[in-house]
Image: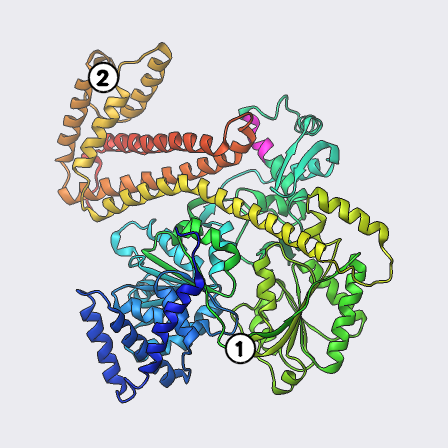
């Protein structure tokens, strides 16, 4: 990839093309709707055999621009056309809030459809998918392109109908789950997805980066002893700081010798680290994580006796999603609500790996430049910053930094109250529910009426955001809730200086700060932004840097207690350093997740491909004979040691036990290994011929898929256990990832050998006389 990737040069080229599109605006004004639809069809036919030329592209954009003007009354401006051209080249377009990204999407979707691609448009939530499907969808339909909404909870027939549309709107999880479910079906006709051609991602940073931490999972219940979580909770409550070590940055915790002794006494075991005691060790570690690394009202909330995950970037609760691998149960035990059974993974994929399967990918968002390296490394996407249509008129003030949290709180209330008194609407951004509720109590004490938006009431989100630009309105929101909804200002608010945005702390990621600022000053509106922070904020509290420690100690000594801010550019530099360090750590976590998932991803692709081949065929025939030979040659081979001889005897008994194989075990042991294989295959073929041909084909296919699916679930579970334990075992110089790759490959070989073995056994159990013909 080109590292000195120059936005300005690229934007200049695109601008030239955009100007030519605008020049041609009269080209289609005299055509009626049926003629425009006909034009769509002509192009569709033409591009089946030909490439799109630059001239074609300009005409196509001109047509779409005309349609949008007619249907929505919106005329795409130069910068919107530039944005659309960037997306068409499979890049990420960074466009500021209010620049009309929704309209930009229209052009690229239309041109991809006439190229012969199916287009999936992915948005951050169902509300936005529905809204954009209604608005932009009508322009596409006006031009003769079919549009559908991929909603949750539909049956197979409805899903299949949706996937026949040219353009499909939906959320990441819905598309991802459809993919996973498609790879669990029993017949090819039950698949719903029609290929992964082109995906356009709205709010690309939120979806490709923030959500990429949580893989998509389809699961069912797993039997386990839930009382262990409650017992482990009693143990961890007795833990003192000397019993464990903690690394907040890497989110790691481990027991030291004193803690291990305490745990072993509690569980009454000689050693926690033997294979038999793995479950106890695992549950103890989970409860430690729940108590000391997971924080209430930051990582999760408890609503109506239920633990809900909070999305760390939007502050939204995520109902229905659970922390995996037992962590959710541990938090339930800690919070003393009902502990629910852990689920067993049936299918899983990371968001990164799902999107990387599309032939072509593009995205748009208000903020992407700070994560450019990640977009490039993981998705191979360049980021192009699109200039705004009108100059940004927002006044961005330097941060006010206070000595203490308390002083910061007082200053925020003062700032909000004088703006409120003159009628200027204010949006206050906080990065957790806890600080959201703290500021709310301060405002209530000061008698300032305000509306709150956080994970506990995000259902009214659109409505709260819509009111946020009215005169005198004060809105308190956790991170960037309400993305995708514009805050519109009333006429009198313009004269008062537009919307004022007050950030109450710097977020872990600079991108989120920029999003908050971008809520104000849209499309050339006036606006104001300022962050008010204190040196006691989490970001600076946890910033591990010697120079900062010394500077901070000096500052605290000089604290004049007059409530005035200590404004020094030095602190602002430390804040950016702290943010960059955390961004780097989070990127490493996501890259780590991806590296581990790539091991499973390779395995998943092999299994899904084989599953597809089996589904496509009506009979296994040759394969079943091949598998019988393969299994027989492994089980009836010369042993290298007595121990191996024992193991092979067991396997041989298991393979032939319960079957009607016409030779006794004594006779078999006297034969050559090859001969046994031949006799097994020959006998199986005589049994097969006693069945009607289509019956035996159906039985074999069903049995094979059944075993493969059951064993795959067990294998996924073993991979989860392996992944969990690998860090505990990776002492010394061994790289845990390399160990995981090696042992994961061994587990995969075992999985393949297992389902082949059980399939061979099932074939030998076939009994034509026992078959009831009904």
- Picture coordinates of residue 483, whole percent (x, y): 54, 67
Question: Relative to the observer, which residue lies in front, 88 or 660?
Answer: 88
Distance in Å between CA atoms under marks 1 and 2 = 86 Å
| Relative image position of residue 299 (x, y in whole percent) | 62, 52
User: Circle 1 sits on which residue?
Assistant: 523
Is 123 inside the magenta-drawn segment?
no
Q: Main secondary structure of the magenta part?
A: helix
498 relative to 696 in the view: left or right: right
Q: Is residue 347 left or right of residue 459?
A: left
Find residue 496 and report its image quarter: bottom right
What residue sits 40% from the left and 71% below the top? 82
The one of 576 and 474 positioned closer to us in this rendering: 576
Per the image, the residue denoted by label 2 is 664
Q: Residue at 85% of width from left, 53% of height from top?
A: 558
Query: Few, some or many C-alpha atoms within 10 Å of disc 1 (few <14, some 14-19, many ≥20)?
Result: some
- The image shows residue 404 at horizontal and vertical percentages of 80, 56
Please say whether residue 516 is visible from this viewpoint.
yes
Circle 2 sits in a helix, a strand or a loop, which is it? Answer: loop
| Label 1 vs label 2, nearer the camera | 1
Q: Disc 1, disc 2: CB below 8 Å?
A: no
On residue 463, which mark appears?
Answer: none
Q: In terms of secondary structure, where does tag 1 sit?
A: helix
Q: Who's the residue at 73% across and 35% down the image? A: 239
Which residue is outermost to the bottom? 30
Residue stretch rendered in magenta on the structure: 276-282
Image mark count: 2
Local crowd size for mark 2, using a 10 Å CA cut-off: few (<14), some (14–19), many (≥20)? few
The question of residue 279 being in magenta is answered with yes
User: In terms of sequence position, does the residue under pointer 1 or pointer 2 come before the other?
Assistant: 1
User: Image quarter for residue 5?
Assistant: bottom left
């Amino acid at each position: 990839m080109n590292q000195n990737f120059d936005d300005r040069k690229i934007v200049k080229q695109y601008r030239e093309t955009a100007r030519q599109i605008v020049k041609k605006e009269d080209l289609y004004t005299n055509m009626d709707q049926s003629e425009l639809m006909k034009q769509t069809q002509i192009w569709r036919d033409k591009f089946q055999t030909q490439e799109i030329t630059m001239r074609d592209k300009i005409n196509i954009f001109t047509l779409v621009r005309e349609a949008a003007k007619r249907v929505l009354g919106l005329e795409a401006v130069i910068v919107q056309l530039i944005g659309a051209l960037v997306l068409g080249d499979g890049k990420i377009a960074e466009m500021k809030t209010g620049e009309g990204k929704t309209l930009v999407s229209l052009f690229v979707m239309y041109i991809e459809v006439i190229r012969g691609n199916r287009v999936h448009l992915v948005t951050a939530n169902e509300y936005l998918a529905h809204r954009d499907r209604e608005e932009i969808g009508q322009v596409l339909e006006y031009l003769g392109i079919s549009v559908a909404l991929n909603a949750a909870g539909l049956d197979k027939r409805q899903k299949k109908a949706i996937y026949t549309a040219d353009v499909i709107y939906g959320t990441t999880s819905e598309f991802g789950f459809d993919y996973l479910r498609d790879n669990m079906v029993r017949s090819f006709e039950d698949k719903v997805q029609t290929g992964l051609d082109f995906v356009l991602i709205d709010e690309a940073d939120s979806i490709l980066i923030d959500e990429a931490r949580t893989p998509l999972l389809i699961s069912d219940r797993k039997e386990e002893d839930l009382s262990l979580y409650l017992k482990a909770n009693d143990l961890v409550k007795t833990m003192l700081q000397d019993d464990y070590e903690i690394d907040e940055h890497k989110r790691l915790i481990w027991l030291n010798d004193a803690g291990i002794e305490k745990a072993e006494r509690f569980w009454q075991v000689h050693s926690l680290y033997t294979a038999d005691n793995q479950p106890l060790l695992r549950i103890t570690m989970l409860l430690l994580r729940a108590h000391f690394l997971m924080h209430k009202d930051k990582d999760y909330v408890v609503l109506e006796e239920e633990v809900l995950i909070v999305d760390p970037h939007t502050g939204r609760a995520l109902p229905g999603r659970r922390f995996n691998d037992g962590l959710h149960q541990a938090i339930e035990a800690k919070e003393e609500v009902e502990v629910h059974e852990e689920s067993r993974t049936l299918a899983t994929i990371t968001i990164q790996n799902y999107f990387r399967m599309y032939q072509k990918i593009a995205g748009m968002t208000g903020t992407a430049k700070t994560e450019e390296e990640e977009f490039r490394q993981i998705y191979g996407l360049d980021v192009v910053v699109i200039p705004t249509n009108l100059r940004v008129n927002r006044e961005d003030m330097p941060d006010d930094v206070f000595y203490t949290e308390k002083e910061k709180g007082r200053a925020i209330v003062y700032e909000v109250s004088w703006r409120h008194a003159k009628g200027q609407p204010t949006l206050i951004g906080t990065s957790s529910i806890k600080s959201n509720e703290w500021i709310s109590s301060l405002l209530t004490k000061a008698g300032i009426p305000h509306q709150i938006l956080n994970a506990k009431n995000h259902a009214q989100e659109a409505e709260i955001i819509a009111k946020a630009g009215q005169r005198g309105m004060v809105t308190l929101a956790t991170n960037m809730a309400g993305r995708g909804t514009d805050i519109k200002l009333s006429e009198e608010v313009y004269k008062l200086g537009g919307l004022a945005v007050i950030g109450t702390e710097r977020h872990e990621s600079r991108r989120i700060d920029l999003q908050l600022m971008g809520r104000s000053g849209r499309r050339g509106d006036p606006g104001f932004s300022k962050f008010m922070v204190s040196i006691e904020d989490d970001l600076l509290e946890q910033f591990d840097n010697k120079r900062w420690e010394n500077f901070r100690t000096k500052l605290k000594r000089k604290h004049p207690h007059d409530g005035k801010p200590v404004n020094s550019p030095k602190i602002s530099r430390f804040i950016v350093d702290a943010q960059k360090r955390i961004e780097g750590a989070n990127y490493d976590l996501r890259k780590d997740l991806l590296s581990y998932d790539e091991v499973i991803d390779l395995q998943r692709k092999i299994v899904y491909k084989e599953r597809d081949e089996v589904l496509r065929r009506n009979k296994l025939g040759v394969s079943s004979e091949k598998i019988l030979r393969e299994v027989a040659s492994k089980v009836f081979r010369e042993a290298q040691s007595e121990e191996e001889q024992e193991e092979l005897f067991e396997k041989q008994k298991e393979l032939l036990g319960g079957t009607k194989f016409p030779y006794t075990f004594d006779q078999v042991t006297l034969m050559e290994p090859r001969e046994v294989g031949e006799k097994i295959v020959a006998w199986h073929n005589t049994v097969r011929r006693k069945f009607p041909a289509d019956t035996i084909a159906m039985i074999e296919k069903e049995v094979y898929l059944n075993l493969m699916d059951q064993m795959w679930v067990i294998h996924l579970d073993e991979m989860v256990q392996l992944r969990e334990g690998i860090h505990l075992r990776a002492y010394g110089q061994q790289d845990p990832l390399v160990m995981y790759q090696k042992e994961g490959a061994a587990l995969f070989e075992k999985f393949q050998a297992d389902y082949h073995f059980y399939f061979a056994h099932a074939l030998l159990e076939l009994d034509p006389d026992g078959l009831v013909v009904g």
